[in-house]
Amino acid sequence: MERSAVFGGLQPNYLLYPSRNSSSLPFSDHRTRLPNFSPPPSLSLKLQKQVSSCFKAVSPFKRGAACSDTHSDTFELADIDWDGLGFAYVPTDYMYSMKCTKGGNFSKGELQRYGNIELNPSAGVLNYGQGLFEGLKAYRKEDGNLLLFRPEENAMRMIMGAERMCMPSPTIDQFVDAVKATVLANKRWVPPPGKGSLYIRPLLMGSGAVLGLAPAPEYTFLIYVSPVGNYFKEGVAPIHLIVEHELHRATPGGTGGVKTIGNYAAVLKAQSAAKARGFSDVLYLDCVHKKYLEEVSSCNIFVVKGNSISTPAIKGTILPGITRKSIIDVARSQGFQVEERLVTVDELLDADEVFCTGTAVVVSPVGSITYKGKRVSYGEEGFGAVSQQLYSVLTKLQMGLIEDKMNWTVELS
């Protein structure tokens, strides 16, 4: 069965949507029409036309619970178990793609049916790891509208990372417009309020063929999405970490401070060993002194002592997390003293509370830390008082449940 393209040629009256029950083909013959759709004016004119064309040409399953919308029509949610969402890949309907050549600028981005991509075996990302990724979320409000959380921050972080990796990058406006278009095209996959979020994964990679070690001649910017629940299997229950003092996630002068793909493969060995022993994840130390905290495999770490909250300073080996940055601002607004500095493992073991932050984990309480065979517990019941307060404020902001005085959210309707 041949897949039809939404843009760049034929625009048929119907396209085939992925079947949740099909075990053979990626697309199944379910055809229905979608109610009239109008993209928000905040999208660029070009993307408004693309999204409108997409929704006129294609319609999702007429199954699942109806969700109220600000438009006069109803919008049908995807037919999946919203209560059973974990942090796992769920295929959705559309992805966004944009290309440019070395030394050029990104342009002519388009929505495409979600599916496999084709890469030259000699692509820079496959041979030399020339690639970055981002992560952000969309939430559904009670009125059916959608909220993005600080997408401009992700765009700026990708620009910074691209410079380090010798790659061109989309502009902030291009990045944000592409995120908006992708979310709206996959609107039925945004979980109902309180059931999770739509995880958004922008990728930037050297897609051009290169044999010798050099920047790739062509680059692809791609966005796909997936509905998700909690990152850790414990949910919001406390996680249990082990401190790794032999293997290291990053080194001074390396790429630990940018979200390049190689940073994450480097933690798999220690993480796999830790999980086999019953731990949730690994906390890494600096590679020079082996006593200062860096970060967990995919999230930042915070240490609470009294009214003081400390977190490792950004010095090139730690990813400048957007949730980290947000929690710092929220904590200060709540009257806490926040310090970004070197934090020793001894301070960690003497803390009142410990918690992690990240786009995927949001705020996750740490129940125990194990270091060189010594286990220190911070409470097995759930959030501590400080992490609970910060988690509550942040998540209410993200889901539109309180006034956004920070001006962090972007609303889509």
Image (cartoon, rainbow, N blue to C red):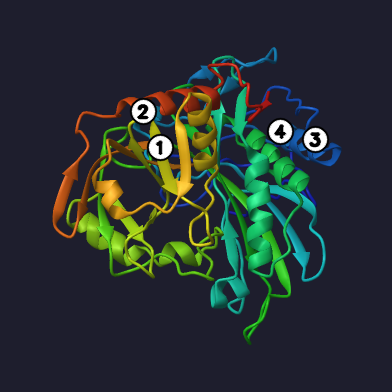
Q: Are circles 4 and 3 on residues that touch, CB within 8 Å?
A: no
Q: Quadrant of the C terminus?
A: top right
The numbered mark at residue 386 is 2
Instruction: Work out how far the residue at label 2 is from the one at label 4, CA to CA, in angstroms.
Output: 44 Å
Instruction: Work out how far the residue at label 1 is from the one at label 2, CA to CA, in angstroms.
Output: 9 Å
The numbered mark at residue 48 is 3
Give SS at disc 2.
helix
Between disc 1 and disc 2, whose residue precedes? 1
Q: Are circles 1 and 2 on residues that touch, CB within 8 Å?
A: yes
The amino acid sitting under disc 4 is: Phe
Please state which of the two labelled residues, at mark 4 or mark 1, is closer to the viewer: 1
Instruction: Work out how far the residue at label 3 is from the one at label 2, CA to CA, in angstroms.
Output: 43 Å
Between disc 2 and disc 4, whose residue precedes? 4
User: Is any part of residue 49 visible from this angle?
Assistant: yes
Q: Residue furthest bottom?
A: 212
Give SS at disc 3.
helix
Residue located beneath label 1 in the image: 309
Between disc 4 and disc 1, whose residue precedes? 4
Report whether 43 appears left or right of 72. Answer: right
Q: Residue at x 61, y 26 (%)?
A: 146
Instruction: Work out how far the residue at label 4 is from the one at label 3, CA to CA, in angstroms.
Output: 11 Å
Between disc 4 and disc 3, whose residue precedes? 3
The amino acid sitting under disc 1 is: Ile
Q: Quadrant of residue 185?
A: top right
Please state which of the two labelled residues, at mark 4 or mark 3, is closer to the viewer: 3
Residue located beneath label 4 in the image: 55
